[in-house]
C-alpha cells in the first residue's frame, strides 16, 4: 500500500489512514505511543475519557513545561488531536467489520503519526518585510489485527 508507514499486513487485519490532518505533531506522537498495543474497545474508551478531560494522555516525549497529572506523570488533554484519532479508529473498525472480522478481538498492531505536507503562509510586516508562518499537516496510520483468545 502506498503511503503507509508499515508494509506488514496479515489477512486478519484492517487498516485506516487520515491524510493531512491539521493537528499538533507533538500531541499526535504521544497519543499514538499511548494507544499502540491496546485492544480497540479499551483504546476507544481511553480516547472518549480524554476528550471529556477525565483521563490525561501521558507524554513520553516533548516534555518541556508539561504539567504532571495525578497518577500519570506528565500529561495533557489534546482534545483536537484526540477527535481525529477517534475518527481514524472508527474508520478502521468499520473496515474490519466490512472484512467480517470479529470487532471484539481487535488489537492496535500498528499506529503512527508522521509529517505530511507543509502549508507556507507569510504575514506582511512593516517596511516591506514578511514573517513566515509555516504549518505542518499530519498523517495518521492505523492497523488493527484480530487476535485469538
Image (cartoon, rainbow, N blue to C red):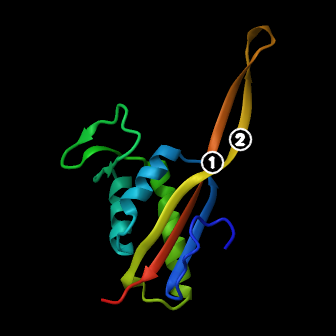
Whichever of callouts 2 and 1 sits on the residue coming sooner in the sequence is 2
Query: Image height check: is 45 above or below 138?
Result: below
Residue 65 in the image: state x and y as whole percent.
35, 31
Q: Give neighbour class at mark 1: few <14, some 14-19, many 20+ (Cα, 10 Å).
A: some
Q: In the rendering, which numbered label is found on residue 46?
A: none
Secondary structure type for disc 1: strand
Q: Residues within 10 Å of mark 2 (few under 14, many from 20)?
A: few
Q: Nearer the viewer, residue 3 or 14?
A: 3
Given residues 1 and 56, the one toward you in this image is 1
Residue 52 is at least partly visible in this image: yes
In the rendered image, the vertical position of residue 109 relative to residue 136, given as above or below? below
Image coords of residue 19 (percent x, y) = 64, 59
Mark 2 in CB contact with mark 1 (< 8 angstroms): yes
Could you tell me which residue is drawn at 47 percent across and 44 percent down? 26
Q: CA distance from mark 2 to mark 1?
A: 8 Å
Quadrant, the N terminus: bottom right
Drawn side of residue 139 relative to residue 122, left or right: left
Left or right: residue 94 versus residue 133 is left
Report the number of numbered marks: 2
Q: Position of residue 7 (x, y in %)?
A: 59, 73
Rendered residue at 78%/8% (across/down):
127
State whether residue 32 is above or below residue 118.
below
Q: Look at mark 2 in the image and give the residue it sits on.
A: 119
Q: Quadrant of the C terminus?
A: bottom left
The residue at 32%/58% (across/down) is 49
Which disc, if any, is residue 137? 1
**Nearest to the observer: residue 17 or residue 112:** 112
Q: Secondary structure at mark 2?
A: strand
Vertical comparison of 137 with 46: above or below: above
Considering every residue shown, the one lying at the far top of the view is 127
**Position of residue 69 measured from the top left corner of the image (x, y, whole percent):** 24, 43
Amino acid at each position: 500500500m502506498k503511503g503507509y508507514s508499515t508494509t506488514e499486513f496479515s489477512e486478519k487485519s484492517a487498516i485506516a489512514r487520515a491524510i493531512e490532518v491539521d493537528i499538533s505533531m507533538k500531541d499526535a506522537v504521544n497519543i499514538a505511543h499511548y494507544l499502540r498495543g491496546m485492544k480497540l474497545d479499551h483504546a476507544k474508551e481511553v480516547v472518549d475519557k480524554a476528550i471529556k478531560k477525565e483521563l490525561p494522555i501521558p507524554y513520553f516525549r516533548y516534555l518541556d513545561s508539561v504539567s504532571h497529572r495525578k497518577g500519570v506523570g506528565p500529561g495533557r488533554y489534546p482534545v483536537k488531536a484526540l477527535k481525529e484519532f477517534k475518527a481514524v479508529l472508527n474508520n478502521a473498525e468499520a473496515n474490519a467489520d466490512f472484512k467480517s472480522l470479529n470487532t471484539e478481538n481487535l488489537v492496535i498492531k500498528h499506529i503512527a503519526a508522521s509529517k505530511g505536507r507543509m502549508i507556507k503562509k507569510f504575514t506582511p510586516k512593516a517596511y516591506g518585510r514578511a514573517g513566515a508562518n509555516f504549518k505542518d499537516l499530519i498523517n495518521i496510520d492505523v492497523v488493527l489485527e484480530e487476535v485469538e483468545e
